[in-house]
Image (cartoon, grey):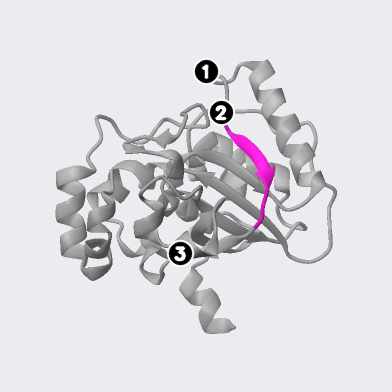
Amino acid sequence: MRRPALASLLAATTALSLTFALAFATPSRAAEDAVVIPAPAMDAAQASGIQTAVVAGGCFWGVQGVFQHTAGVVNAVSGYAGGTKATADYQTVSSGRTGHAEAVEIKYDPKKISYGKILQIYFSVAHDPTQLNRQGPDVGTQYRSALFTTSDEQKKVAEAYIAQLNSAKVFNKPIVTKVGALEAFYPAEAYHQDYLTLHPNQPYIAYNDLPKVENLKKLFADNYIEKPTLVSASKATN
């Protein structure tokens, strides 16, 4: 678990991050195994222009990393959703009392990837949707499984897909993912962006998150891209 009191150490140096991860973040097992699941029976109609999806599934480092390696995604930003602007900072969110979840805002081209495919990747490889208010070694409501929808259509697709997966019993336990309308998304601090790519040897990343990217490559080969779409690159071109 990444302790809130040590958040500043993560920003300071990679060496301190490594020490912290070894001391506090080594879980009893590696990241949850990916689950092969069917595609959604219902999907969003293809729209014109860049669309937005906001998902939460534990530590945003790994979720961001997965979608940065997903074709059709033009940007994936780590941040906070579910709370207010006043509490949208890492140390405060880590208290678990802000209403925020660590989330990722995904900007995508619907001509290249659908909302339904994003959900399939999210449920299959990005996290375990059966864990309540935790994900692997990280515990608290800020690590909850949640979909913050940006339209009524997204809400219908998400709820229908959860019902479909529960009915098919593809997971050993019921899905606990909450679906609700997005009120606001607040980007996280700069040191959290592109974290998986910048720190691949950090034990937390290597143990919990890199396997998710490998599972994406294995299970969603047609949607996988080797070169990640980084936040830093997006800023450089804007």
Disc 3, SS: loop
User: Is residue 122 in the magenta section?
Assistant: no
Quadrant where the image shows the C terminus: bottom right
Which SS class for mark 1?
loop
Query: For the residue marked with disc 3, what is the amino acid?
Result: Ala
Q: Residue 173: which numbered mark, if any?
A: 1
Compute the Cα span from label 3 to label 2.
25 Å
Count neighbours of disc 1 (C-alpha within 10 A) and say few if under 14, some if 14 to 19, many if 20 or more: few
The reply to whether residue 126 is in sight is yes
Q: Which residue is mark 2?
A: 176
Q: Where is residue 68? Give x, y as percent.
A: 52, 58
- Image: magenta residue range: 177-183
Residue holding disc 3: 188
| Residue type at numbered disc 2 | Val
- Nearer mark to the viewer, of 1 and 2: 2
Residue sitting at 81 percent across and 45 percent down?
A: 153
Residue at 78% x, 51% y is: 151
Q: Is residue 197 left or right of residue 222?
A: left
Q: Amino acid at mark 1?
A: Lys
Label pair 3/1, CB-CB below 8 angstroms: no
| Residue 179 lies within the magenta run | yes
Choose the circle earlier in sequence order: 3 or 2: 2
Task: Tell me the tag on residue 25.
Answer: none
Q: CA distance from mark 1 to mark 2?
A: 9 Å
Q: Residue 227, can we see it? A: no
